[in-house]
Amino acid sequence: MSARPETGGDSEPAGASGTADGGGPGAEGLGRPLPEQVRARVIEYGSDVLGGMRTNELPPLLRRVARFEPRRRARLAGPQIAAQLETDEGFRGRVGERVERVWPELAEGLRSGVVPPAADPVAVAACAYLLRPRGWPEIIEGVREELERRTSAKEADEAVEELDSVRRRLEESRHAHRADLERLRARVRDQRAEITELRRKVHDERQRAKEARERARRALDETAARESESVSQVGALEAENRRLRSRVEAAEAQVENARRAARTGRNADEARLRVLLDVLVEASHGLRRELALPTSLEAPADHVAEAGQRRVSLGGLPDDDPGLLERLLTVPRVHLLVDGYNVTKTGYGTLPLADQRTRLLNSLEGLASRTKAEITCVFDGADVDTPPALAAPRRVRLLFSAPGETADELIVRLVGAEPPGRPIAVVTSDREIVTAVRRAGARAVSSPIFLRRLE
């Protein structure tokens, strides 16, 4: 934008107050603030002009925002721009020059007192405020009235539209109300019919209840008659029972006398039989020693293994007494049940399962040779497709759990297969197995104590 031209003679710079005296004491002015739309348009024009002014030409208060984008200047410094336009005639003149270059016909019409009828009222008022021709306050007031008239007309149109909308909603509500009323009337008719039907059913139920009470009364009378008859029959049966009891007591006395007589004759036979049994036992012991036969060919645990039980998972309760295992191994005919994987995973769980089984069986073989105890080692068969065959000279019984049976169940079954009174020790650290075998009368030895004994 070029600099404002110098004044000369009676010429006024574009954008001056619009009066001959250049805004002197007799200058025109507004009686109230600009309409908000006109004020925003004036600020927009001033913001656009700020971007093209040199730094030394900028008003001091607006230098800070002159570098901003025009819309941002208008948003952040709108009040300062409006105040500068109101008080700084030079700045207002520059903005007026810009407006006059953009709308020369509008500016000329305003100076000649003719406002173009098709012009935007807001633009007319903004140009009148910046150029300030004669009568510019009246122009702005006229624009204010036009804007207010438009606003009022718009509000009236909106009110009419709102009224029409309310009327439509009211009519719809009336239709909906009529539909709901008809529906409720139909429901009332249905409910009345249902009430009539229910009353009929209640009457029928009352009749049936009356008949049921009559049948109950007759049944009570029949029951009382039967009770009296039963009392008489019970009396007769009790008398017969007493008679039969006396006959039984007499028969028992006769049987007891016969037993005494038979016992006297049987004592001699029992003495001869006892001597014969002693001879047979001594002969069998001698024959066993002569033939070097084992003390027993089969054990109850062998029968459990032959029944197809090939899979087991053992466990035991930890015991703080290190000497418990030694005492158990010295008991004659003790049966030691070993939870295989519980022991191996406690002592050498990093090895493969096959190596764990081999190492434990070798250790148990030596323990069986030293103690002569019956040892059964049980492994869980879930990890092997086909349990390995037993070695011929092995002194340790090896069992694997079968499909559908856990190792815990097999151990408990092995303990239950032994006769009452036989000493049984279960090596495991599984608390559930310990609880079960203790309930069956077996002793539990923890896996760490057993491993120390093997070492």
Image (tube, grey):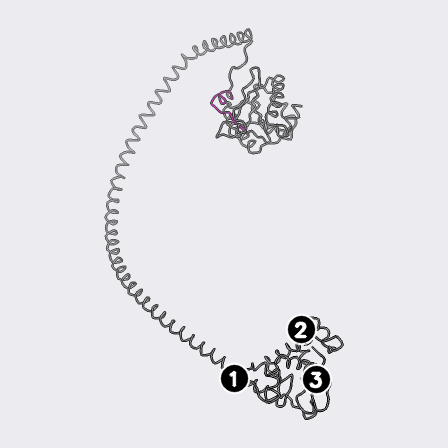
* Spatial separation of the CA atoms under disc 2 and disc 1: 31 Å
Residue 135 at x, y percent in the picture = 61, 90
Residue 64 at x, y percent in the picture = 72, 73
Quarter-of-image position of residue 148? bottom right
- With 122 as the anchor, is 243 left or right in this view? left
Residue nearest the viewer, comparing 121 with 431? 121
- With 239 as the anchor, is 157 left or right in this view? right
The stretch drawn in magenta includes residue 306: yes
Q: Name the residue type under label 3.
A: Glu
The stretch drawn in magenta includes residue 361: no
Q: Are marks 1 and 3 in contact (CB under 8 Å)?
A: no
Residue most toward the bottom? 26
Q: Name the residue type under label 2.
A: Arg
Tag 1 or tag 2, which sits nearer the N-term?
2
Quarter-of-image position of residue 175? bottom left
Q: Which circle marks residue 89 in the picture?
A: 3
Residue annotated with mark 1:
149
Residue nearest the viewer, comparing 150 with 189? 150
The residue mark sitting in front, 1 or 3, is 3
Q: Name the residue type under label 1.
A: Arg
Tell me the residue at 24%/43% (across/down): 225
Residue 209 at x, y percent in the picture = 26, 53
Question: Callout 1 environment at 10 Å: few (<14), some (14 to 19), or many (20+)?
Answer: few
Residue 151 at x, y percent in the picture = 52, 81
Q: Label 3, secondary structure: give it.
A: helix
Residue nearest the viewer, comparing 439 with 77? 77
The answer to whether residue 284 is above or below residue 58 is above
* Spatial separation of the CA atoms under disc 1 and disc 3: 32 Å
Q: Label 2, secondary structure: give it.
A: helix
- With 258 as the anchor, is 118 left or right in this view? right
- Magenta-colored span: 301-312
